[in-house]
Structures are given as structure tokens and as C-alpha cells.
């Protein structure tokens, strides 16, 4: 086999972050009675949260802000769009979100099947994720995915973030893998695919959204089952 070590991204690749985050935010919308605070529509709140979350994650991955700022300011800015300037509420919602989010267990179609397929073929499966250490392990446990992965490399443990070379080099060191026998599988062109390219690793772009790629990858799939044509 050309590849022996398969490195997966978790969020948006296997674990359906959008579905799980939306369900969690709906819980918070109800828990904190945001409809009584002037936010009449949950979908409006979710749209504003998503807008700010995407931009803050970009700043976080580029090293401009720290984790804590990302966690509570995405709530703060979303609430501000509805003229709710309540820092205490924003911080409490940030805590509640991270407590409840990992309890959700939606994964993309064929996630368990492809992981079992690769396990049966004796690939060594690992994760490289920019997500938070404790949160990612809880997600894996509640989605019943933890048994598939030998190593879980997070940005916290490696002290680096995708697409930086350091997190990939740390992953190779921790797993005993070599660039030549490793493959990175992820949905994010700027983090997963560029990160793999930064260390000379082959990659698979999981194009769930059927977008036009702006960075080259070794392979492209639109559905996880299509990995069976590569591996």
C-alpha cells in the first residue's frame, strides 16, 4: 500500500459540525429565552452567529486571537447585532455551548462505514484537528468514533494550528509516520489541504459542499464512500 497512515480532520469532514452546532444553539436560544430579549427568530440568530464565528475562526487560525476570545466573542457579536450588549450572557452562552455541543452526535453519511473499511484494511487512522482538546475527545466519545483512531493530535497539544507545518510534523513524530506513507483527508482547503502541502504530504479534499477548489489536492471526493476508490 502506498499509504499506511491516514490523518483525518474531524469537524466538517466526519463530524457534522453545522448540524450539531445549529442544534446546540437552538438549545441555548431556548435556555436563555432569547425570544424575550428581542430576537424573534432563531434562524436570524443562527445566521448572525455563523457569520461572526466564521470570521473569528479565521482570525484564530491565523494567530490573531486566543481561544477564550473566540469562544465568547462569537456570542457577544451575534447578540450585539440585535442590540443586546450583555457580556455576562455572552460568556455564559459560550460555556453552555461548549458543554452541550460535544453531546451531539450527527456525522456525515458513510462515516462509520468508511472508518470500519479503512480499519479492516489495516490502515493506521489518526486525527489532526484545530478544535479544542477536551471538546474534540467528547465529540468522538458521544459519536462513538473514538475507537477508530490511534492518535488524536489537537492544536492545544501540539501548540500549533493547521496549516502550520509544526502541527503536521508533531503528528508525524507522535505516530511514527513518514510523509511518504501518509495521507491527509479534510474539508478545509486552507487548513487541511494547504497544511498537508506545507510538509509535502498527499491529501484528499472532501468537497461536501461541491465548491470550486481554489487550492490543488492530490484527490477530490464529494462523498466519504468515494474514499474506497483511493484506498
Image (tube, rainbow, N blue to C red):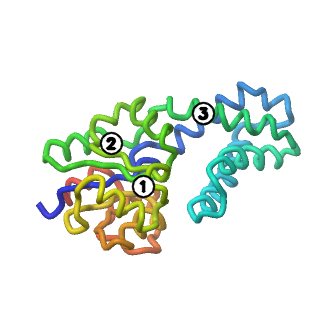
Residue 63, picture quadrant: bottom right
Q: Where in the figure is residue 126, as x and y percent of width and height?
A: 30, 49
Structural crowding at the residue carrying mark 1, measured as other residues with C-alpha within 10 Å and reported as few (<14), some (14–19) or many (≥20): some
Say what secondary structure mark 3 lies in: helix
- Disc sitting over residue 81 in the figure: none
Quarter of the figure with the C terminus? bottom left
- Which of pointers 2 and 1 lies earlier in the amino acid sequence? 2
**Mark 3 vs mark 2, CA separation in Å:** 21 Å
Q: Which quarter of the picture shows residue 119? A: top left
Q: Mark 1 points at which residue?
A: 208
Q: Mark 2 to mark 1: distance in Å?
A: 13 Å
Sequence-earlier tag: 3 or 1: 3
Quadrant of residue 59 in the image?
bottom right
Q: Residue 24 carries which label?
A: 3
Q: Do the residues labelled 3 and 1 touch (CB within 8 Å)?
A: no
Q: Residue 111 carries which label?
A: 2
Q: For this view, does 88 lie left or right of residue 225?
A: right
Compared across the picture, whether 100 is left or right of 125 comes to right
**Dot 2 lies on which element?**
helix
In the rendered structure, the answer to whether residue 7 lies left or right of residue 176 reads right
Residue 158: x %, y % from top left:
43, 54
Is there CB contact under 8 Å for labels 3 and 2?
no
Looking at the rendered image, the disc whose residue lies closer to the viewer, 2 or 1, is: 2
The secondary element bearing badge 1 is classed as loop
Q: Where is residue 225 in the image (x, y as percent from the top left)?
A: 27, 50
Q: Which residue lies furthest to the left in this view?
A: 1
Amino acid at each position: 500500500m502506498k499509504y499506511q497512515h491516514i490523518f483525518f480532520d474531524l469537524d466538517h469532514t466526519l463530524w457534522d459540525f453545522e448540524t450539531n452546532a445549529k442544534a446546540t444553539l437552538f438549545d441555548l436560544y431556548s435556555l436563555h429565552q432569547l425570544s424575550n430579549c428581542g430576537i424573534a427568530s432563531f434562524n436570524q440568530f443562527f445566521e448572525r452567529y455563523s457569520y461572526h464565528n466564521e470570521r473569528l475562526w479565521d482570525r484564530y487560525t491565523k494567530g490573531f486571537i486566543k481561544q477564550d476570545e473566540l469562544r465568547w466573542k462569537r456570542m457577544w457579536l451575534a447578540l450585539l447585532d440585535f442590540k443586546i450588549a450583555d457580556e455576562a450572557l455572552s460568556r455564559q452562552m459560550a460555556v453552555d455551548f461548549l458543554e452541550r455541543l460535544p453531546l451531539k452526535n450527527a456525522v456525515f453519511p458513510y462515516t462509520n462505514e468508511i472508518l470500519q473499511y479503512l480499519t479492516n484494511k489495516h490502515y493506521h487512522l489518526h486525527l489532526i484537528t484545530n478544535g479544542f482538546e477536551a471538546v474534540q475527545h467528547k465529540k468522538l466519545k458521544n459519536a462513538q468514533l473514538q475507537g477508530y483512531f490511534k492518535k488524536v493530535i489537537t492544536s492545544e497539544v501540539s501548540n500549533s494550528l493547521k496549516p502550520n507545518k509544526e502541527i503536521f510534523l508533531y503528528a508525524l513524530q507522535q505516530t511514527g509516520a513518514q510523509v511518504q506513507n501518509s495521507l491527509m483527508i479534510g474539508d478545509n482547503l486552507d487548513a487541511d489541504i494547504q497544511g498537508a502541502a506545507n510538509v509535502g504530504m498527499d491529501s484528499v479534499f472532501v468537497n461536501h459542499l461541491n465548491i470550486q477548489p481554489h487550492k490543488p489536492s492530490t484527490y477530490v471526493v464529494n462523498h466519504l464512500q468515494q474514499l474506497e476508490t483511493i484506498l
